[in-house]
Amino acid sequence: MESFRSNYNKLFTSFFLFSALLLVFMSSMPITNAKVHHHDFVVQATPVKRLCKTHNTITVNGMYPGPTLEVNNGDTLVVKVVNRARYNVTIHWHGVRQMRTAWADGPAFVTQCPIRPGGSYTYRFTIDRQEGTLWWHAHSSWLRATVYGALIIRPRQGDEYPFPKPHRETPLLLGEWWDANPIDVVRQATRTGAAPNISDAYTINGQPGDLYNCSAKDTIVVPIAAGETNLLRVVNSALNQELFFKVANHKLTIVGADASYVKPFTTSVLMLGPGQTTDVLITANQPPARYYIAARAYASAQGAPFDNTTTTAILQYKSAACSTTTSKCVSSKPVIPKMPAFNDTATVTAFTTSFRSPRKAPVPTKIDHNLFFTVGLGLNNCPRGARSRNCQAPNGTRFAASMNNVSFVLPSNFSLLQAHQQGVPGVFTTDFPANPPLRFDYTGNVSRSLWQPAQGTKVYRLKYGETVQLVLQGTSIFTAENHPIHLHGYDFYIIAEGFGNFNAKRDTAKFNLVDPPLRNTASVPVGGWSVIRFVADNPGVWLMHCHLDVHITWGLAMAFLVENGVGKLQTLEPPPADLPKCN
Ligand code: C2O
């Protein structure tokens, strides 16, 4: 009896304690109706016909581009990826912060080994304080040429946009199409050491548009009614090309970029580097007609070949739409926008320097790591005895690219994150240099002896919570060009940009520490520099690279290793049970 009573008392006490705790816990939580979205992605070859010819294209669920995911801030995504293709694949959720969930980030051999043909892996992650447009893409070889789609993040349920609610929303994914298998294109480049073949078309939502052969009847039409406002979510998902974007006769009001809001500003032309997104409002305030939405190259590298074609969609006023009785629209040619010149860097600078955060931003001011990375191309001398057919870059060399003269090499038997978490030695070293090994006139006439980078798998180590300032300095080795530098797992403030060599004495005065834009990809000006700042508040191994895939192929990448902090909320989650194995 005695023991029964004491057990009963214990039970009662614990029940009471539990309920009290539950109450405290619930009242401390915001009222939320965050959802969990489940999706199945089947990566598979699908016949896709473009430019008069059918290719067996790698797609997700047979769609090109792949499915659009729509969520609210705070929601969780659970995406099961099944690989039915004949290539290794991974999916990266470009721009998603992945707080403590680095295992779901996706770059092959960085946060996971690839999903083998026949295998599968489920990505689980939560959207944490990001609103706007992001996207997802394959992150293995050049599969992202066709394996990509939009990720739309609306405000939390019950929250509003910080601008008048648009009548409609249209994602516009800018892509790049080869009349070939993109994997063959990159393999050939890797074999020869030369630059890969340029693409044959750009696309908007997978369609090249009126100006290409066999494409007119599939041109994307974006309907709009007079007076209506449409939120265009523009994504540059092209592989290797920065793009200008314009809508004939219409002004665009920029309200967001890379899933952060910006102080609205109005422009007639956008420039997006691969990886970047821009949310713009467009109002139907022009005479009812059909207007081209167009994108074509911003080609900043002097003398380098590029795809100079133009992709188009049509903004079609409802009152100008085809009527069956008159079929008027067939004869009315859409109005063509005047695009900037291919090398119009002045327009790009005016655009990129217009971005501001909507309000005062919490930019870190006490800096723990003051870093300076050179970013650019190089040329590797061919090893003695190498065949000339494998050394087809200029002067019998092979193309290379580097940060601080380290040309990044991915591991092949482990992911960096696994090696870090399991303490596997020999996969990477932690000696990525904080400064270039040699100072030189980066944007001047660089001596030939400085053209050859060294290969390495080096990371830069950061403690949890440390602050970083990073100068990204373009080089003019071989050629200077604009590099879209993307950091995984983080958003960063772009506090300044400029041309020539960064000079701390002169340029620190230009830092915007008040309302700089928050981005995940910075367009480092051709022959110039950008300065970014971030706080290392997300443990894991995070790739930073040029988002021109040709440059990643050549090694224009490095990774930050961010250590765990104190306690669960500052610690990387354990790896999911189905994380793909390398061997
Ligand atoms: Cu859009 Cu490394 O990624």
Image (cartoon, grey):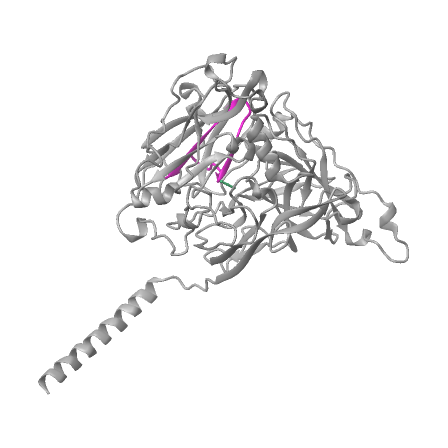
Q: Is residue 550 above or below residue 118?
A: above
Residue 5's spot in the image, x, y percent? 13, 84
Q: Residue at x 45, y 22 (%)?
A: 453
Report whether residue 483 is seen.
yes
- Residue 207's quadrant in the figure? top right
Q: Name the image quarter holding the N terminus.
A: bottom left
Q: Is residue 33 magenta?
A: no
Residue in view at x 51 percent, y 42 percent: 140
Q: Which of 15 and 412 is in front in this view?
A: 412
Q: Which of 287 and 36 is in front in this view?
A: 36
Residue at x 58% of width, y 47% of height: 148
Report the front residue among 104 and 398. 398
Q: x and y percent of residue 144 in the render?
A: 57, 43
Q: In this view, does 294 lie above or below 375?
A: below
Could you tell me which residue is drawn at 9 percent across and 85 percent down?
2
Residue 548 visible in the picture: no
Does 520 appear in magenta?
A: yes
Percent x, y for residue 294?
A: 71, 39
Residue 217, how many percent across, how many down?
79, 48
- The part of the chain drawn in magenta is 513-535
